[in-house]
Image: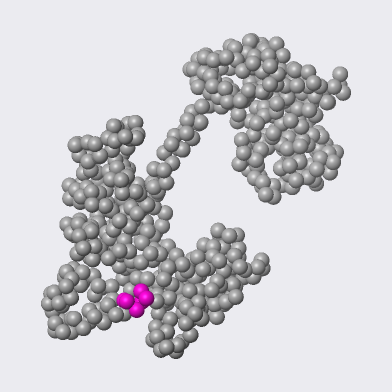
C-alpha cells in the first residue's frame, strides 16, 4: 500500500503543470517534479536528497522551513524564466513543521493543474497545499461522480462552499448544462471548452475536464473552470482591434524632441505656445521630420492632456470609408454597416485631441464635413440628419503643398484657412545638421534598449559621414541607418565605425556620377533635387521682393501666389 501511494504521488507530480519543490524537516529536497526541472533548469538527480539552498538558486524554502511562516505570491527570477511562487510550511498533527513545499509557475503562461489526482489520505495535506495555491478554479470528483475536492478559487467563482459540493453528486453545482465530470467518467476522454452556468448566480463559465487515471484505472475526474467573462472581454478587444489601433494615448513630450538649431528651436517654441491654447495647428514638413512627435507633445502639454489622443492617417483609409470612419454612421446607413452604428474618430476624440495625418489626402466630401466640425463644433454621422456636438482640438499634418492644392481646386480654400490658423514648419534634417550629434546620441540609447546592446558612441569618421549626408528621409532615415549599423556591430564592439554604416545614398550618387563629369554633377555638389529646388525657390522669392522694393503684396501678385503663401515661404526659408 505504501509503495502504491508513492507511485501515485509520483504520477501526480509528473503530470502537474506547476513546479513543485518540497523539503523535509532537515531541509533536504524530497520532491522535485518535471516542471520544476524545466523551469529551474536542473535535473532531479542533482537535487534530490541534497540541501535545498545548495542546489536551487535564489531559493528561500529553507528560510520558510526555519520560520514556519508562508510566503505567498512571491516573484522570483530563474535565469530566462520569471515565476510566481507560494512557499508553504507543512505541519504535522502535533503542529510542528515537518517540511516545506514551494509551488510555482511561469507567470507568462496559464498553468493547468494535473490531469491525474487521487484521494489517497496519505497525500491529502500536500495535495491541498498544491491545489489551494493555484488561481484556477478546480473541482475534483471520484469515480462515482461524488465531489471530493474544490479549491478557494472555485468558491470565489461559483459562490458555492465545500459543504455545498463535497460528498455530493457532480451535478450539484450546475445551474444550466450537462456535467462534464459525468461525461469524462462515462467516456474516459477529456472535454475542452464546454459552456455552462454554475452556482446560484448562474455564472457563465467554460469547463475543461480530464480523467484521473492511476495504473491504467479510472479514478475520477478533475475540472478547471474558467470565467467566460474573460473570454468575452478578449473577444470584444479583438472585435474592436482596428478601432483601438487608432486610439492612442500621447506618449511623447517636448523633452523627447531633440535639437538645438535655431530654426528647429523656433518650431518647438511655436508648438509650445500653441499647446497652451485650443488653436487648430497644421504641422508642415517633409516625411520623417517628426510631425507626429510634435502632435503628441502638443497634446501632452495642453489642458487636454488627460483626454483621448486619436491618431488618424487619412491616406491609409479608402476614400469611400473616410467619411464614415471620421464622423461615424448610424445603423442601416449603408450595406454592411455595423449593427448599432459606429461612433467615428471625432466622437472618440471628444474632450481630447484628434491628429489628422496626411490631411492633404482628404477627399472633397470629407473636406466639407471637416469644415463643419471646425466651424460648428459638431458632426453629422453618415445616414443621420441629427448633429452631435463634439469638443475636439484638431492637429493636422501634411508634407503636401496645400497652397498649390488650393490653387488647383483640390483643397477647399475655406477649409485651408480654418486649418491653417497656426502653421508650424518643421525643418528637414539637412537644414539642421548641427542637431545630428544630439540625435545620434539619443537614437543610440533608444536602439540599445530595443536591441539589447551597449553602444556607447560613434567614431568621429562615422559621424562625419552622417553629417555629410543630405537625409532625404530625415530623422526617420537617420534612425534606420543607425539601426542597421548597430545590427552590423559584433558583440563587444561599443562604438559605431564607418564600416558599420550602410552605404548612404549620397555616396552612391557620387560613385555613380563622379564630380566634374560633363560639369553637371560638380554643379550639384551632392545636393538632392529637393535641396536644389528649395535653393532656387528662395532666390526667386528674394528677387521678387527686391523688385517690389520689399512690398510683399506686390511681390505676391507678381509671383501669382497668395499673400499668405508668400509669408509661409518667407518663414520657411528664413527671409526677413
**Residue shown at the point (36%, 66%) measured from the top left:** 286
73 to the left or right of 285: right
Quadrant of residue 336 within the rendered picture: top left
Q: Residue furthest front?
A: 518
Residue 124 vertical position relative to residue 309 in the rendered view, above or below: above
In the rendered view of the protein, which quadrant contains the N terminus? top right
Residue 284 shows up from this direction: yes
- Of residues 392 and 57, which is closer to you in this image? 392
Colouring of the image: one colour
Magenta stretch: includes residue 325: no
On the image, the x and y values in percent for residue 485 come to: 57, 69
- Of residues 404 and 329, which is closer to you in this image? 404
Total marks shown come to 0
199 to the left or right of 544: right
Which residues are the magenta region?
529-534
Which is the main secondary structure of the residues drawn in magenta?
helix
**Residue shown at the point (25%, 78%) measured from the top left:** 575
Quadrant of residue 531 within the rendered picture: bottom left
373 to the left or right of 256: left
Magenta stretch: includes residue 530: yes
On the image, the x and y values in percent for residue 513 come to: 47, 82
**Residue shown at the point (36%, 74%) measured from the top left:** 530
**Residue shown at the point (67%, 27%) measured from the top left:** 131
- Of residues 87 and 232, which is closer to you in this image? 232
On the image, the x and y values in percent for residue 123 come to: 77, 23
On the image, the x and y values in percent for residue 84 come to: 64, 40
Amino acid at each position: 500500500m505504501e509503495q502504491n501511494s508513492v507511485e501515485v504521488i509520483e504520477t501526480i507530480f509528473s503530470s502537474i503543470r506547476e513546479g513543485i519543490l518540497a523539503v523535509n524537516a532537515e531541509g533536504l529536497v524530497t520532491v522535485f517534479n518535471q516542471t520544476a526541472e524545466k523551469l529551474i533548469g536542473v535535473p532531479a538527480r542533482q537535487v534530490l536528497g541534497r540541501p535545498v539552498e545548495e542546489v536551487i538558486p535564489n531559493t528561500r524554502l529553507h528560510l520558510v522551513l526555519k520560520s514556519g511562516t508562508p510566503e505567498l505570491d512571491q516573484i522570483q527570477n530563474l535565469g530566462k524564466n520569471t515565476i510566481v511562487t507560494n512557499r508553504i510550511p507543512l505541519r504535522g498533527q502535533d503542529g510542528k513543521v515537518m517540511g516545506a513545499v514551494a509551488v510555482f509557475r511561469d507567470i507568462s503562461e496559464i498553468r493547468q493543474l494535473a490531469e491525474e489526482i487521487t484521494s489517497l489520505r496519505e497525500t491529502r495535506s500536500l495535495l491541498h497545499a498544491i491545489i489551494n495555491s493555484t488561481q484556477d478554479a478546480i473541482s475534483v470528483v471520484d469515480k462515482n461522480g461524488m465531489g471530493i475536492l474544490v479549491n478557494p478559487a472555485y468558491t470565489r467563482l461559483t459562490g458555492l462552499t465545500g459543504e455545498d459540493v463535497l460528498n455530493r453528486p457532480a451535478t450539484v453545482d450546475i445551474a444550466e448544462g450537462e456535467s462534464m465530470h459525468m461525461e469524462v467518467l462515462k467516456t474516459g476522454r477529456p472535454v475542452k471548452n464546454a459552456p455552462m452556468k454554475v452556482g446560484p448566480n448562474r455564472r457563465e463559465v467554460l469547463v475543461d475536464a480530464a480523467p484521473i487515471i492511476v495504473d491504467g484505472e479510472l479514478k475520477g475526474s478533475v475540472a478547471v473552470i474558467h470565467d467566460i467573462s474573460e473570454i468575452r472581454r478578449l473577444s470584444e478587444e479583438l472585435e474592436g482591434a482596428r478601432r483601438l489601433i487608432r486610439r492612442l494615448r500621447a506618449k511623447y513630450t517636448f523633452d523627447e524632441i531633440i535639437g538645438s538649431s535655431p530654426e528647429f528651436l523656433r518650431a518647438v517654441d511655436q508648438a509650445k505656445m500653441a499647446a497652451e491654447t485650443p488653436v487648430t495647428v497644421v504641422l508642415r514638413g517633409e516625411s520623417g521630420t517628426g510631425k507626429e512627435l510634435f502632435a503628441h507633445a502638443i497634446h501632452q502639454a495642453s489642458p487636454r492632456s488627460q483626454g483621448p489622443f486619436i491618431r488618424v492617417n487619412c491616406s491609409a483609409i479608402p476614400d469611400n470609408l473616410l467619411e464614415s470612419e471620421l464622423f461615424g454612421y448610424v445603423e442601416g446607413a449603408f450595406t454592411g454597416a455595423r449593427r448599432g452604428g459606429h461612433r467615428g474618430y471625432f466622437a472618440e476624440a471628444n474632450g481630447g485631441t484628434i491628429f489628422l495625418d496626411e490631411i492633404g489626402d482628404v477627399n472633397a466630401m470629407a473636406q466639407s464635413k471637416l469644415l463643419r466640425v471646425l466651424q460648428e463644433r459638431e458632426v453629422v454621422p453618415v445616414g443621420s440628419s441629427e448633429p452631435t456636438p463634439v469638443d475636439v482640438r484638431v492637429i493636422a499634418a501634411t508634407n503636401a503643398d496645400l497652397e498649390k492644392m488650393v490653387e488647383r481646386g483640390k483643397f477647399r480654400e475655406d477649409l485651408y484657412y480654418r486649418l491653417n490658423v497656426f502653421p508650424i514648419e518643421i525643418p528637414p534634417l539637412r537644414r539642421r545638421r548641427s542637431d545630428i550629434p544630439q540625435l545620434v546620441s539619443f537614437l543610440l540609447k533608444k536602439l540599445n534598449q530595443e536591441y539589447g546592446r551597449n553602444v556607447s558612441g560613434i567614431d568621429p569618421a562615422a559621424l562625419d559621414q552622417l553629417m555629410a549626408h543630405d537625409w532625404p528621409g530625415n530623422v526617420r532615415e537617420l534612425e534606420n541607418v543607425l539601426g542597421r549599423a548597430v545590427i552590423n556591430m559584433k558583440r563587444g564592439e561599443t562604438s559605431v565605425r564607418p564600416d558599420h554604416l550602410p552605404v548612404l545614398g549620397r555616396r552612391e550618387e557620387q560613385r555613380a556620377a563622379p564630380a566634374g563629369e560633363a560639369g553637371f554633377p560638380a554643379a550639384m555638389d551632392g545636393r538632392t533635387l529637393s535641396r536644389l529646388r528649395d535653393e532656387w525657390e528662395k532666390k526667386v522669392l528674394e528677387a521678387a521682393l527686391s523688385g517690389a522694393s520689399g512690398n510683399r503684396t506686390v511681390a505676391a501678385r507678381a509671383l501669382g501666389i497668395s499673400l499668405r503663401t508668400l509669408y509661409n515661404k518667407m518663414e520657411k526659408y528664413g527671409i526677413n
